[in-house]
Amino acid sequence: MWLLFSAASAVFDAGKHILSKQTLSRDKVHPVTAAWALAFFSLPLTFPLALWNWPFALDQAFWLAASIALAMDFVSMLMYAKAIQSSDISLSIPMLAFVPLLLLVSGYLINAESPTLLGITGVCMIVAGAYFLHFDYRRIHPLQPFFAIFKDQGTALMFGVAIIWGISSALHKRAIVHSNPFFYTGFSAVVLTVALTPLAVMFGRKSLIKAWRKKQLKHLAAIGLFDGAAILMESLGQSIAYSAFVLAIKRTGIMLTAIGGAVFFHEKIKDRLLPIGVMLVGVLAIAVSKF
């Protein structure tokens, strides 16, 4: 069941990435407004579920993990929005492929998660496939995203986002275990909305006002709903499986984007077949591993 939740998270996450890039670039939405929209427009989905699944009590472990994780998410959401706006996706998005790799360490230290060797191999295969998926080998050197960390602001920011998510995802897992996935997803959205609203008013006021116009409202609401659905599915997966496994499957959203482009928009996919194959083998390795 966790595999289905993780796959659903990958689908919604792929949609979020595409819509975020389109909205930030074409509609000229301020990054702070975009970060606010991710949290605010997820509330129609996540908040009612949180109320319906309110836990009887929340212990100290929950509050400690949630406080640290959401503070990190607050920073990473601003960094993500700025990175998407200011950098080529082919350079910035591959940085997120390393989140599951970092989670192998943080998951062990924070939640004592110890995947089998087969599971770890699957994670590494997905990471490698996701990293190389969007490379134009005739134009981009395989290590160019790493070189871009020192030259391109957006890529550097996304690398920072990957490091933060590699730690905060393990903390989210701890908070979920000490509450429940439905409550925690809605709780997180409320906290982040409250934290981001003053910043959106102060630094992106004009963009925030424009956000309520019909055209931008439709785009931003879609981003928020996709993000809320992705996080909810991720939380459900994390409640019953290792965080590194769930986030690895979620990263296959990069693969789904490429396949969708080939099916619906007739984009060339020949050069991407090998990375896609590597990722699929990685998914299979994780699925059959015992944990």
Image: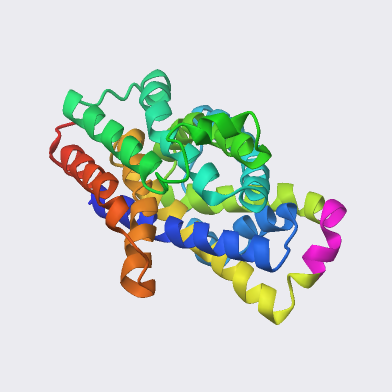
Q: Is residue 73 left or right of residue 248?
A: right
Residues 71 and 38: in front is 38
Q: Is residue 167 above or below residue 227?
A: above
The reply to whether the magenta stretch includes residue 208 is yes
Residues 52 and 18: in front is 18
Q: Is residue 239 above or below residue 290?
A: below
Instruction: Give me the residue at 57% from left, 47% from top.
Output: 188
| Highlighted magenta segment, given as a residue range | 201-209
Instruction: Give me the residue at 18% from left, 42% from top.
Output: 281
Q: Is the magenta stretch mostly helix, strand or loop?
A: helix
Residues 146 and 282: in front is 146
Quadrant in the picture for residue 67: top right
Instruction: Give me the residue at 34% from left, 40% from top.
Output: 248
> Residue 105: percent from the left, percent from the top?
39, 21
> Residue 108: percent from the left, percent from the top?
36, 21
Residues 13 and 51: in front is 13
Q: Residue furthest front?
A: 138
> Residue 119: percent from the left, percent from the top?
21, 31
